[in-house]
Amino acid sequence: MDSTCAYSLSTPWRHSLRTKLTLVQVCKAWRNLALPFLYNRIILYHAEQILYLARTVRDSSNVAHLIKHIHLDCFTARLPEALNEMAFILLEMTRLKSISMGFRFFMGGITHLHRRAIRKFKTALAGLPDSLTELGYCLQSLDNDVPFNLPLRHFNTFPQLTSLTMPLSSSWYTDYKARHAVRLPHLAELELFCREDPDFSIFDSWDMPNLRRLWMTQNPCNMYLFHPKIGLSEFFQRHGGLLEFLDLSEAKTYDALKFGELLRSCTKLRHIVLPWTWVPYLLHKSFGAHAAFHLDIWSHTESHTGDTLGAAEDRILRDARVLDAGLMHLRHLPLLIPPNTDLCPDEVVTYDLLAFRIVQSRRLVKGVPIACDVPNSEDGVYEPELSDRESSGMSDEGSDDEDAYEDTDEELWYIPETTRGIPA
Protein backbone atom coordinates (compact mmCIF):
# COMPACT_ATOMS: atom_id res chain seq x y z
CA MET A 1 0.00 0.00 0.00
CA ASP A 2 1.26 3.42 -0.87
CA SER A 3 2.32 5.29 2.26
CA THR A 4 0.94 8.56 0.98
CA CYS A 5 -2.50 7.04 0.69
CA ALA A 6 -2.31 5.56 4.20
CA TYR A 7 -1.89 8.92 5.87
CA SER A 8 -3.99 11.13 3.62
CA LEU A 9 -7.56 12.14 4.48
CA SER A 10 -10.39 10.36 2.78
CA THR A 11 -12.86 12.30 0.66
CA PRO A 12 -15.67 12.24 3.29
CA TRP A 13 -13.30 13.56 5.95
CA ARG A 14 -12.06 16.35 3.70
CA HIS A 15 -15.67 17.34 3.01
CA SER A 16 -16.47 17.31 6.75
CA LEU A 17 -13.49 19.48 7.60
CA ARG A 18 -14.40 21.92 4.85
CA THR A 19 -17.95 22.09 6.20
CA LYS A 20 -16.69 22.62 9.75
CA LEU A 21 -14.30 25.36 8.63
CA THR A 22 -17.09 27.09 6.75
CA LEU A 23 -19.37 26.83 9.79
CA VAL A 24 -16.72 28.34 12.04
CA GLN A 25 -16.17 31.22 9.62
CA VAL A 26 -19.92 31.87 9.41
CA CYS A 27 -20.22 31.83 13.21
CA LYS A 28 -17.34 34.29 13.53
CA ALA A 29 -18.94 36.56 10.94
CA TRP A 30 -22.28 36.47 12.76
CA ARG A 31 -20.50 37.18 16.04
CA ASN A 32 -18.76 40.22 14.58
CA LEU A 33 -22.09 41.48 13.26
CA ALA A 34 -23.89 40.90 16.56
CA LEU A 35 -21.30 42.36 18.95
CA PRO A 36 -22.13 46.05 18.26
CA PHE A 37 -25.79 45.36 19.04
CA LEU A 38 -25.06 43.26 22.13
CA TYR A 39 -22.79 45.84 23.76
CA ASN A 40 -24.32 49.06 22.46
CA ARG A 41 -26.51 49.60 25.56
CA ILE A 42 -25.68 47.97 28.90
CA ILE A 43 -27.60 47.99 32.19
CA LEU A 44 -25.82 46.65 35.28
CA TYR A 45 -28.19 45.60 38.08
CA HIS A 46 -25.69 43.70 40.27
CA ALA A 47 -22.11 44.37 41.32
CA GLU A 48 -21.05 40.93 40.07
CA GLN A 49 -22.01 42.00 36.56
CA ILE A 50 -19.34 44.70 36.75
CA LEU A 51 -16.72 42.02 37.41
CA TYR A 52 -17.94 39.94 34.47
CA LEU A 53 -17.91 42.96 32.15
CA ALA A 54 -14.39 43.93 33.25
CA ARG A 55 -13.19 40.39 32.53
CA THR A 56 -14.76 40.55 29.07
CA VAL A 57 -13.13 43.91 28.36
CA ARG A 58 -9.73 42.50 29.32
CA ASP A 59 -10.16 39.39 27.19
CA SER A 60 -11.53 41.23 24.13
CA SER A 61 -9.93 44.58 23.49
CA ASN A 62 -12.60 45.70 21.02
CA VAL A 63 -15.58 45.25 23.36
CA ALA A 64 -15.03 48.48 25.32
CA HIS A 65 -15.14 50.54 22.12
CA LEU A 66 -18.56 49.08 21.25
CA ILE A 67 -20.23 50.31 24.46
CA LYS A 68 -22.12 53.54 23.73
CA HIS A 69 -24.65 53.68 26.60
CA ILE A 70 -24.31 52.34 30.15
CA HIS A 71 -26.57 52.58 33.20
CA LEU A 72 -25.34 51.62 36.70
CA ASP A 73 -28.15 50.54 38.99
CA CYS A 74 -26.18 48.13 41.16
CA PHE A 75 -25.56 48.14 44.91
CA THR A 76 -21.73 48.10 45.20
CA ALA A 77 -21.30 48.46 48.98
CA ARG A 78 -21.01 44.69 49.50
CA LEU A 79 -18.45 44.30 46.73
CA PRO A 80 -15.93 47.17 47.01
CA GLU A 81 -13.67 45.78 44.27
CA ALA A 82 -16.48 46.41 41.80
CA LEU A 83 -15.82 50.14 41.99
CA ASN A 84 -12.19 49.61 40.95
CA GLU A 85 -13.31 47.44 38.06
CA MET A 86 -15.90 50.01 37.00
CA ALA A 87 -13.20 52.68 36.94
CA PHE A 88 -11.14 50.45 34.66
CA ILE A 89 -14.12 49.94 32.33
CA LEU A 90 -14.82 53.69 32.13
CA LEU A 91 -11.24 54.42 31.14
CA GLU A 92 -11.49 51.86 28.33
CA MET A 93 -14.80 53.13 26.91
CA THR A 94 -13.46 55.81 24.59
CA ARG A 95 -16.63 56.05 22.46
CA LEU A 96 -19.16 56.34 25.27
CA LYS A 97 -22.18 58.54 24.51
CA SER A 98 -24.26 58.30 27.69
CA ILE A 99 -23.76 57.19 31.28
CA SER A 100 -26.20 57.30 34.18
CA MET A 101 -26.11 56.12 37.79
CA GLY A 102 -29.32 55.12 39.56
CA PHE A 103 -30.45 55.42 43.16
CA ARG A 104 -29.09 52.06 44.25
CA PHE A 105 -25.59 52.95 43.11
CA PHE A 106 -25.48 55.74 45.71
CA MET A 107 -27.48 54.02 48.45
CA GLY A 108 -26.34 53.67 52.06
CA GLY A 109 -23.17 51.64 52.40
CA ILE A 110 -21.10 53.60 49.92
CA THR A 111 -19.52 55.37 52.91
CA HIS A 112 -17.92 52.05 53.89
CA LEU A 113 -16.10 51.66 50.59
CA HIS A 114 -12.39 52.21 50.33
CA ARG A 115 -11.75 55.89 49.72
CA ARG A 116 -8.98 55.00 47.30
CA ALA A 117 -11.51 53.17 45.12
CA ILE A 118 -13.83 56.17 45.27
CA ARG A 119 -11.05 58.53 44.20
CA LYS A 120 -10.12 56.22 41.34
CA PHE A 121 -13.75 56.06 40.20
CA LYS A 122 -14.14 59.85 40.31
CA THR A 123 -10.91 60.20 38.32
CA ALA A 124 -12.36 57.87 35.70
CA LEU A 125 -15.53 59.98 35.55
CA ALA A 126 -13.43 63.09 34.98
CA GLY A 127 -11.67 61.29 32.13
CA LEU A 128 -14.82 60.42 30.20
CA PRO A 129 -14.70 61.46 26.53
CA ASP A 130 -15.75 65.04 25.81
CA SER A 131 -18.14 63.69 23.16
CA LEU A 132 -20.49 62.52 25.94
CA THR A 133 -24.08 63.59 25.21
CA GLU A 134 -26.01 62.22 28.24
CA LEU A 135 -24.88 62.28 31.87
CA GLY A 136 -27.03 61.27 34.82
CA TYR A 137 -26.43 61.28 38.59
CA CYS A 138 -29.80 60.13 39.94
CA LEU A 139 -29.41 61.00 43.62
CA GLN A 140 -32.60 61.40 45.59
CA SER A 141 -31.81 61.03 49.29
CA LEU A 142 -28.34 60.65 50.78
CA ASP A 143 -26.50 61.25 54.01
CA ASN A 144 -24.44 64.41 54.09
CA ASP A 145 -21.26 62.45 54.86
CA VAL A 146 -21.30 60.50 51.61
CA PRO A 147 -17.77 60.92 50.23
CA PHE A 148 -18.90 60.62 46.63
CA ASN A 149 -19.06 64.26 45.60
CA LEU A 150 -17.89 66.11 42.52
CA PRO A 151 -16.87 69.65 41.57
CA LEU A 152 -19.36 71.72 39.58
CA ARG A 153 -16.68 72.43 36.99
CA HIS A 154 -16.88 68.69 36.21
CA PHE A 155 -19.91 69.41 34.00
CA ASN A 156 -17.95 71.98 32.01
CA THR A 157 -15.77 69.23 30.51
CA PHE A 158 -18.66 67.88 28.41
CA PRO A 159 -19.65 70.64 25.96
CA GLN A 160 -21.68 68.22 23.81
CA LEU A 161 -24.16 67.32 26.56
CA THR A 162 -27.80 67.28 25.47
CA SER A 163 -29.22 65.69 28.65
CA LEU A 164 -28.06 66.18 32.26
CA THR A 165 -29.41 64.72 35.51
CA MET A 166 -27.83 66.05 38.69
CA PRO A 167 -28.51 66.51 42.41
CA LEU A 168 -29.10 70.06 43.57
CA SER A 169 -27.38 70.24 46.93
CA SER A 170 -24.88 72.61 48.49
CA SER A 171 -23.23 69.70 50.31
CA TRP A 172 -22.59 67.47 47.30
CA TYR A 173 -20.22 69.70 45.30
CA THR A 174 -16.68 70.43 46.42
CA ASP A 175 -16.54 73.88 44.76
CA TYR A 176 -20.11 74.95 45.56
CA LYS A 177 -19.16 78.47 46.68
CA ALA A 178 -16.79 79.13 43.78
CA ARG A 179 -19.67 79.45 41.27
CA HIS A 180 -17.66 78.35 38.24
CA ALA A 181 -19.02 79.35 34.86
CA VAL A 182 -20.42 76.35 32.99
CA ARG A 183 -21.34 76.53 29.32
CA LEU A 184 -23.53 73.80 27.83
CA PRO A 185 -24.66 75.15 24.45
CA HIS A 186 -26.44 71.94 23.34
CA LEU A 187 -28.17 71.03 26.60
CA ALA A 188 -31.89 70.47 25.94
CA GLU A 189 -32.93 68.36 28.97
CA LEU A 190 -32.17 69.08 32.64
CA GLU A 191 -33.39 66.93 35.53
CA LEU A 192 -32.78 68.18 39.08
CA PHE A 193 -33.02 66.11 42.25
CA CYS A 194 -33.62 68.84 44.81
CA ARG A 195 -32.42 67.73 48.23
CA GLU A 196 -33.05 69.38 51.58
CA ASP A 197 -30.66 72.24 50.80
CA PRO A 198 -31.29 73.22 47.15
CA ASP A 199 -29.85 76.48 45.89
CA PHE A 200 -30.67 77.48 42.32
CA SER A 201 -28.24 80.39 42.43
CA ILE A 202 -25.46 78.07 41.26
CA PHE A 203 -27.02 78.32 37.79
CA ASP A 204 -26.53 82.08 37.67
CA SER A 205 -23.15 81.50 36.02
CA TRP A 206 -24.39 78.72 33.74
CA ASP A 207 -25.09 79.23 30.05
CA MET A 208 -27.82 76.90 28.73
CA PRO A 209 -29.23 78.66 25.65
CA ASN A 210 -30.94 75.54 24.27
CA LEU A 211 -32.75 74.33 27.41
CA ARG A 212 -36.21 73.02 26.44
CA ARG A 213 -37.25 70.39 29.01
CA LEU A 214 -36.97 70.52 32.81
CA TRP A 215 -37.77 67.96 35.53
CA MET A 216 -37.68 68.92 39.21
CA THR A 217 -37.81 66.12 41.78
CA GLN A 218 -38.25 67.24 45.37
CA ASN A 219 -36.81 65.60 48.46
CA PRO A 220 -39.46 64.66 51.05
CA CYS A 221 -37.56 66.71 53.65
CA ASN A 222 -38.18 69.92 51.69
CA MET A 223 -41.10 72.07 52.75
CA TYR A 224 -41.42 73.75 49.37
CA LEU A 225 -39.34 74.70 46.37
CA PHE A 226 -40.61 78.19 45.63
CA HIS A 227 -38.74 79.77 48.50
CA PRO A 228 -37.34 83.25 47.85
CA LYS A 229 -33.98 82.32 49.37
CA ILE A 230 -33.07 79.55 46.97
CA GLY A 231 -33.13 81.67 43.81
CA LEU A 232 -35.77 79.73 41.89
CA SER A 233 -37.49 82.77 40.42
CA GLU A 234 -34.15 84.08 39.15
CA PHE A 235 -33.45 80.65 37.66
CA PHE A 236 -36.64 80.75 35.58
CA GLN A 237 -36.08 84.36 34.59
CA ARG A 238 -32.66 83.46 33.23
CA HIS A 239 -33.23 79.97 31.80
CA GLY A 240 -37.01 79.56 31.49
CA GLY A 241 -37.65 81.71 28.44
CA LEU A 242 -37.31 78.80 25.98
CA LEU A 243 -38.75 76.02 28.16
CA GLU A 244 -41.36 73.92 26.37
CA PHE A 245 -41.82 71.13 28.94
CA LEU A 246 -41.90 71.35 32.74
CA ASP A 247 -42.44 68.48 35.19
CA LEU A 248 -43.30 69.42 38.80
CA SER A 249 -45.12 66.19 39.58
CA GLU A 250 -43.42 65.78 42.97
CA ALA A 251 -43.73 69.37 44.15
CA LYS A 252 -45.60 70.12 47.38
CA THR A 253 -48.98 71.83 47.62
CA TYR A 254 -47.34 74.90 49.14
CA ASP A 255 -45.69 75.59 45.78
CA ALA A 256 -49.00 75.95 43.92
CA LEU A 257 -49.54 79.45 45.30
CA LYS A 258 -46.30 80.62 43.67
CA PHE A 259 -46.86 78.84 40.38
CA GLY A 260 -48.46 81.81 38.60
CA GLU A 261 -45.30 83.87 39.02
CA LEU A 262 -43.29 81.11 37.38
CA LEU A 263 -45.54 81.01 34.31
CA ARG A 264 -44.84 84.63 33.47
CA SER A 265 -41.19 83.73 32.78
CA CYS A 266 -41.98 80.64 30.67
CA THR A 267 -43.61 82.26 27.66
CA LYS A 268 -43.05 79.26 25.34
CA LEU A 269 -44.25 76.55 27.73
CA ARG A 270 -46.33 73.92 25.91
CA HIS A 271 -46.53 70.95 28.29
CA ILE A 272 -46.78 70.86 32.11
CA VAL A 273 -46.94 67.86 34.46
CA LEU A 274 -48.41 68.47 37.94
CA PRO A 275 -49.65 66.43 40.92
CA TRP A 276 -53.35 66.00 41.65
CA THR A 277 -53.06 68.00 44.90
CA TRP A 278 -52.56 71.17 42.84
CA VAL A 279 -55.92 70.95 41.04
CA PRO A 280 -58.03 72.71 43.74
CA TYR A 281 -55.68 75.70 43.56
CA LEU A 282 -55.70 75.78 39.77
CA LEU A 283 -59.51 75.71 39.59
CA HIS A 284 -59.76 79.06 41.35
CA LYS A 285 -57.26 80.89 39.16
CA SER A 286 -56.98 81.98 35.57
CA PHE A 287 -54.62 79.10 34.95
CA GLY A 288 -54.74 78.90 31.16
CA ALA A 289 -54.37 82.60 30.45
CA HIS A 290 -50.57 82.58 30.24
CA ALA A 291 -49.97 80.14 27.38
CA ALA A 292 -51.69 77.46 25.31
CA PHE A 293 -49.96 74.51 26.97
CA HIS A 294 -51.12 70.96 27.59
CA LEU A 295 -51.61 69.78 31.18
CA ASP A 296 -50.88 66.28 32.53
CA ILE A 297 -51.94 65.35 36.07
CA TRP A 298 -50.77 62.31 38.05
CA SER A 299 -53.66 60.85 40.02
CA HIS A 300 -54.70 57.64 41.81
CA THR A 301 -58.44 58.36 41.44
CA GLU A 302 -58.96 58.78 37.71
CA SER A 303 -62.79 58.91 37.79
CA HIS A 304 -62.99 61.68 40.39
CA THR A 305 -60.16 63.58 38.70
CA GLY A 306 -61.82 63.35 35.30
CA ASP A 307 -65.15 64.60 36.64
CA THR A 308 -63.51 67.52 38.43
CA LEU A 309 -61.49 68.59 35.40
CA GLY A 310 -64.45 68.13 33.07
CA ALA A 311 -66.53 70.53 35.17
CA ALA A 312 -63.82 73.21 35.10
CA GLU A 313 -64.54 76.33 33.07
CA ASP A 314 -60.95 76.84 31.98
CA ARG A 315 -60.15 75.08 28.69
CA ILE A 316 -56.67 73.99 29.82
CA LEU A 317 -58.11 72.19 32.83
CA ARG A 318 -61.05 70.76 30.92
CA ASP A 319 -58.77 69.18 28.29
CA ALA A 320 -56.14 67.99 30.77
CA ARG A 321 -54.91 64.41 30.64
CA VAL A 322 -54.89 62.13 33.70
CA LEU A 323 -51.87 59.84 34.20
CA ASP A 324 -52.14 56.69 36.30
CA ALA A 325 -49.99 57.18 39.41
CA GLY A 326 -49.14 53.48 39.26
CA LEU A 327 -46.86 54.33 36.32
CA MET A 328 -45.05 57.11 38.13
CA HIS A 329 -41.83 55.09 38.27
CA LEU A 330 -41.58 55.84 34.52
CA ARG A 331 -40.47 59.41 35.10
CA HIS A 332 -40.40 60.36 31.42
CA LEU A 333 -43.76 58.82 30.55
CA PRO A 334 -45.44 62.17 29.63
CA LEU A 335 -42.85 62.60 26.86
CA LEU A 336 -42.55 58.94 25.90
CA ILE A 337 -46.32 58.85 25.31
CA PRO A 338 -47.12 62.47 24.39
CA PRO A 339 -50.65 63.88 24.22
CA ASN A 340 -52.51 62.75 21.12
CA THR A 341 -55.31 65.17 20.27
CA ASP A 342 -56.06 63.27 17.05
CA LEU A 343 -57.63 60.40 18.98
CA CYS A 344 -61.41 60.13 18.91
CA PRO A 345 -63.19 60.28 22.28
CA ASP A 346 -63.67 56.47 22.37
CA GLU A 347 -60.41 55.52 20.66
CA VAL A 348 -57.46 53.98 22.53
CA VAL A 349 -53.83 53.15 21.74
CA THR A 350 -52.33 50.14 23.51
CA TYR A 351 -48.61 49.63 24.16
CA ASP A 352 -47.74 46.02 25.08
CA LEU A 353 -44.59 45.84 27.20
CA LEU A 354 -42.92 42.80 28.71
CA ALA A 355 -44.46 43.15 32.19
CA PHE A 356 -47.61 45.19 31.66
CA ARG A 357 -49.69 47.09 29.15
CA ILE A 358 -50.14 50.87 28.80
CA VAL A 359 -53.49 52.07 27.48
CA GLN A 360 -53.72 55.62 26.13
CA SER A 361 -56.89 57.51 25.37
CA ARG A 362 -57.40 61.19 24.77
CA ARG A 363 -57.95 61.92 28.47
CA LEU A 364 -56.23 59.04 30.28
CA VAL A 365 -53.01 57.00 30.31
CA LYS A 366 -53.10 53.97 32.61
CA GLY A 367 -51.30 50.71 33.23
CA VAL A 368 -53.01 47.34 32.87
CA PRO A 369 -51.58 43.94 33.95
CA ILE A 370 -51.05 41.45 31.14
CA ALA A 371 -53.15 38.29 31.45
CA CYS A 372 -51.27 35.02 30.98
CA ASP A 373 -52.40 31.65 29.68
CA VAL A 374 -52.01 29.97 33.09
CA PRO A 375 -53.71 32.28 35.57
CA ASN A 376 -53.68 31.67 39.31
CA SER A 377 -56.53 34.02 40.12
CA GLU A 378 -59.98 34.80 38.85
CA ASP A 379 -58.97 38.04 37.17
CA GLY A 380 -56.58 36.20 34.85
CA VAL A 381 -53.39 37.83 36.17
CA TYR A 382 -50.50 35.42 36.38
CA GLU A 383 -48.84 35.11 39.76
CA PRO A 384 -45.79 32.78 39.86
CA GLU A 385 -45.93 29.96 42.35
CA LEU A 386 -43.31 29.40 44.99
CA SER A 387 -41.58 26.75 42.88
CA ASP A 388 -41.34 29.22 40.00
CA ARG A 389 -39.79 31.84 42.27
CA GLU A 390 -37.21 29.41 43.58
CA SER A 391 -36.28 28.15 40.13
CA SER A 392 -35.83 31.69 38.81
CA GLY A 393 -33.57 32.78 41.66
CA MET A 394 -36.22 34.84 43.43
CA SER A 395 -36.16 33.10 46.79
CA ASP A 396 -35.98 35.15 49.95
CA GLU A 397 -32.43 34.06 50.67
CA GLY A 398 -31.10 35.06 47.28
CA SER A 399 -32.77 38.42 46.93
CA ASP A 400 -31.74 41.79 48.34
CA ASP A 401 -34.09 44.59 49.24
CA GLU A 402 -31.68 47.03 47.67
CA ASP A 403 -31.93 45.26 44.31
CA ALA A 404 -35.72 45.26 44.25
CA TYR A 405 -36.17 48.90 43.25
CA GLU A 406 -36.22 50.20 39.72
CA ASP A 407 -35.90 53.92 39.25
CA THR A 408 -35.68 54.67 35.56
CA ASP A 409 -37.43 54.03 32.27
CA GLU A 410 -35.76 50.72 31.35
CA GLU A 411 -39.22 49.19 30.87
CA LEU A 412 -39.69 51.38 27.82
CA TRP A 413 -36.28 50.59 26.33
CA TYR A 414 -38.05 47.50 25.07
CA ILE A 415 -39.87 48.50 21.86
CA PRO A 416 -43.55 47.91 22.61
CA GLU A 417 -46.11 46.42 20.29
CA THR A 418 -48.64 49.15 19.52
CA THR A 419 -52.27 48.66 18.60
CA ARG A 420 -54.92 51.26 17.95
CA GLY A 421 -58.66 50.91 17.87
CA ILE A 422 -62.02 51.57 19.45
CA PRO A 423 -62.96 49.13 22.23
CA ALA A 424 -66.24 47.25 21.90
Image: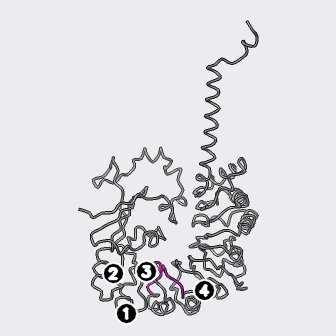
Marks 3/2: CA–CA distance: 14 Å
Tell me the distance, in whole angstroms, between the alpha carbons under discs 4 and 1.
Answer: 27 Å
> For this rendering, which residue is in front, 22 or 246?
22
Residue at the top extreme, as displayed: 1
Q: Secondary structure at mark 2?
A: loop
Q: Which residue is mark 1?
A: 285
Q: Which mark is residue 200?
A: 4
Regarding residue 230, the answer to whether it shows in the image is no
In the rendered structure, which disc, 4 or 1, sits on the residue that comes first in sequence? Answer: 4
Front residue of 163/224: it is 163
* Callout 2 amino acid: Asp
Q: Residue at x 35, y 86 (%)?
A: 280
Instruction: Please identify the quarter of the rendering in which residue 1 is found.
Output: top right
**C-alpha gap between disc 4 and disc 2:** 32 Å
CA distance for labels 3 and 1: 15 Å
Instruction: Give the mark nearest the N terminus, 2 or 1.
Output: 1
The amino acid type, in three-letter code, at marker 4 is Phe
Give the spatial CA distance, label 2 vs label 1: 16 Å
Could you tell me how far apart the alpha carbons at marks 4 and 3 are, in whole angstroms? 20 Å
x and y percentages locating residue 74 in the rendered image = 59, 59
SS class of the residue under badge 4? helix
Identify the mark at residue 274; answer none if there is no mark. 3
Name the residue type under label 3: Leu
Q: Quadrant of residue 191?
A: bottom right
Graded by Cα atoms within 10 Å as few (under 14), some (14 to 19) or many (20 or more), the crowding at tag 2 reads some
Q: Is residue 249 magenta?
A: yes
What secondary structure is marked by label 1? loop
Sequence-first disc among 3 and 2: 3
Q: Position of residue 315 (x, y in %)?
A: 33, 86
Q: Inspect the image, locate mark 1, and give the three-letter code of the amino acid beneath it.
A: Lys
Res 58 label: none
